[in-house]
Image (cartoon, helix red, strand yellow):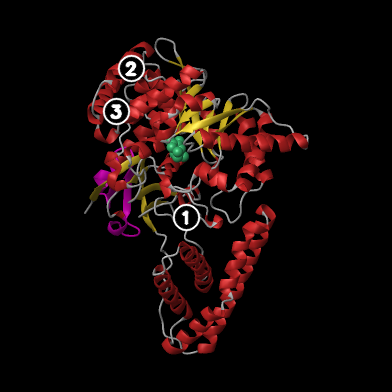
Amino acid sequence: METYLQGIGVSPGIALAAALRFSHDAYDVPQYTITDLAAEQRRLNEAIEATRSDLNSIYNHTVEGLGKTHAEIFRAHIMILDDVALREDIAHQLEIEQHNVEFILHNLAKRYVQAMSQIDDPRFRERTADMLDVVDRLLRHLLAAERPNLRHLERTSVIIARDLTPSDTASMDITKAIGLAVEAGSVTSHSAILARALEIPAVVGIPNVFETVPAGATVIVDGTAGQIIINPEAATIARYEKARQTLALRQRKLLQTSAKGPALTSDGVEVELCANIELPFEIEHSLRVNAHGIGLYRTEYLFINRDTLPNEEEQYEAYAHVVRSLAPLPVTLRTIDIGGDKFIAHLQMLKEDNPQLGWRAVRFCLARPDIFKTQLRAMLRASIHGNLRIMFPMISGIEELRQVKTIVNEVRHELDQKNIEYNPTIQIGSMIEVPSAVALADLLAEECDFFSLGTNDLIQYLLAVDRVNEKIAHLYQPTHPAVLRMIHTAAEAARAAGISCSICGEMAGDPLYTELLLGLGISSLSMAPVSIPLVRSGISRISFKDAQAFAVQVLQMHTATEIKELITQRYQLREEAGENGSDACVNPILE
Ligand code: PEP
Ligand code: MG
């Protein structure tokens, strides 16, 4: 029997394939009785030697890339590996239990964690994490298992998961993974953002999806309606197949009408439409839709899914490539924003209780000037190839902005001394995504060249709604009056200081909000390349004068729901009156 499950549609389109269940706890540790104790001890010794060799090579890479101090952690891991007490414990348990060594090791680790969690000292938490990391490596050698990933898939699949990290999504084999159905997440979680970038239909926030969908079951993902259908009947499949073709045709039509040149409102006001990119192939997508530049390059994606940091040369090549490909159009490189829901395994970032409020973005970079300076050097060097701007994520006040600018100046000075060229008039911008930055927008605007509003985080921090938590996704309201006031305040401060103010959060790519954002004083929008044609076509039906009057009206309103209803009504009226109808935003299945 076919079953419908509802979630949140985060990447439009329709996909149909067999379900592939993906989980991070995919490696099951087997339990069996052994008869040859010596053979089991040998297996353990081999795993220890293989782990030692891994750790030595990571140590050497890290020394090369970051220097000895940062590599020390891997020496510490080798010491854990050589810990006599650990080996004696394993040998002892082997003898008593007569079970396979991975089972013994797994249980011992659990017991250590339990014991260490009783000790009220943060250093023990770090040691526990280190110990678990070593045990994890040992277990993988014993089980000959890799970290679970979606890199190589055997057949076309819909991925079913409890959670997908941004690194899972970024490394996915997109020739085979054609749809996503996930329990965790919301519209602005980074996996959802990536699904849109990859143009893979995706639904998140589906309760118990992992428990409900059996492996291999046929699944339809309707990313437009936010629904999945398990074991669809023949008639349902036929209906969705037709809808898929209709959507593809509409998208092609929109693309054809996505002209080169400026995007103009009906009364001739120009709006800049830039692309957000994460992965290199998106440069091509941005050019295909005639983006006016790259408004946000999330450079942290160069750092994830690998065992070592990218060195200066590798980063320089990557940045120079984007800048050259887009020249003379502007390319805004954001310095790494790791932490939050994006972690880099080899940097030993510990799991935090409140990662969104934790060691993230510039906070991380200011604590690791070595990594930060390497990135800035690569960016500055790449600036000679076109129109490159640098922007900093999660600036929360003047001191932070000054600190990062001081480091930029130090790097410039170092380059000057070595006679290495860069653009001396390079623009430096601040993301406005922490409420305190809005409160200080007038002051920040005096000390930087441009603002880019990160509404994804701004909404999260302003409304105290974790952007990746599906349970409170309904409280994540872009039309909340407080959010709109913040956008207006930041835009006004930028206007008064004579600097530009764009939006690069997901609100920018939803045509529902375009009129209101223009009216609030935003003249540049940056979004997933796939959204540009639709937003561009919507802009041609908006009168800027009306948008300004409309924003004044909306700023007087009291609730998110009323505002959402009103903007939806106006959008529908405009689209119905327009030539293309409401195109790809309407789900053909509902027609
Ligand atoms: C934002 O917060 O709106 C933003 C664009 O940055 P990210 O989604 O990468 O946090
Ligand atoms: Mg952000």
Disc 1, SS = loop
SS type, badge 2: loop
Kindly identify the amino acid type of the residue bearing the numbered disc 1. Answer: Leu
Disc marking residue 510: none
Q: Is residue 238 above or below residue 116?
A: above
- Which quadrant of the figure contains the N terminus? bottom left
Q: Which mark is residue 578?
A: 2
Q: Is residue 123 left or right of residue 410?
A: left
Q: Secondary structure at mark 3?
A: helix
Residue 389 in the image: state x and y as whole percent: 59, 30
When the figure is inspected, residue 118 is found, relative to residue 269, above or below; the finding is below
Across and down, in percent, residue 2 comes to: 23, 51
> Which three-letter amino acid code belongs to the residue tagged 2?
Gly
Whereabouts is ligand 1, in terms of quadrant?
top left
- Which stretch is magenta? 210-239
Q: Residue at x 50, y 22 (%)?
A: 500
Disc 3: CA contacts within 10 A as few (<14), some (14-19) or many (>=20): some
Q: Nearer the viewer, residue 190 or 6?
A: 190
Q: Residue 542: within the magenta?
A: no
Res 323 visible:
yes
CA–CA distance in space, label 1 to label 2: 42 Å
Q: Nearer the viewer, residue 552 or 228?
A: 552
> Which mark's residue is nearer the viewer, 3 or 1?
3
Q: Quadrant of residue 328?
A: top right
Q: Which mark is residue 481?
A: 3
Q: Are marks 1 and 2 in contact (CB under 8 Å)?
A: no
**Residue that mark 1 sits on:** 150
Residue 239 in view of the camera: no
